Amino acid sequence: MAQLKITQTKSYIGSKQNHRDTLRSLGLKRVNDVVVKEDRPEFRGMVHTVRHLVTVEEVD
């Protein structure tokens, strides 16, 4: 199964509480943190919510 490498590229300061909660639930705490998650619809939706704060790469 494919995986997603999610990197937080921008700070969440000044963003909505929902965006902060989404970053935290993805496992991202600060800028340049990286997590690898399975490519599932749940994670795709979370990434879509904070797409302006993260970058995503597909990893095999």
Image: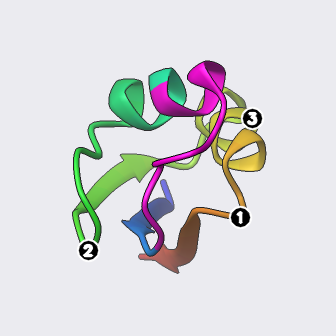
Question: Which label's residue is closer to the chain start, 2 or 1?
Answer: 2
Q: In terms of secondary structure, where does tag 1 sit?
A: loop
Position in image of residue 28 (x %, y %): 29, 46
- The residue labelled by disc 2 is 32
- Mark 3, Cα crowd under 10 Å, few <14 / some 14-19 / many 20+, is few
The spot of residue 25 in percent (x, y) is 38, 24
Q: Position of residue 54 (x, y in %)?
A: 54, 66
Query: Which element carries disc 3, helix, strand or loop?
Result: helix
Q: Nearer the viewer, residue 41 or 54?
A: 54
In this rendering, is residue 14 above or below 1? Answer: above
Contact (Cβ within 8 Å) of mark 1 with mark 3: no
Q: CA distance from mark 2 to mark 1?
A: 14 Å
Question: Residue sitting at 43 percent across and 76 percent down?
Answer: 59
At 65% from the left and 47% from the top, the residue drawn is: 47
Q: Which residue is mark 1?
A: 52
Disc 1 residue type (three-letter): His
Q: Which span of residues is magenta-colored?
A: 10-20
Q: Amino acid at mark 2?
A: Asn
The 10 Å Cα crowd at callout 2, few under 14, some 14 to 19, many 20 or more, is some
Q: Earlier in the sequence, mark 3 or mark 2?
A: 2
Q: Is residue 42 left or right of residue 13?
A: right
Q: Nearer the viewer, residue 7 or 16?
A: 16
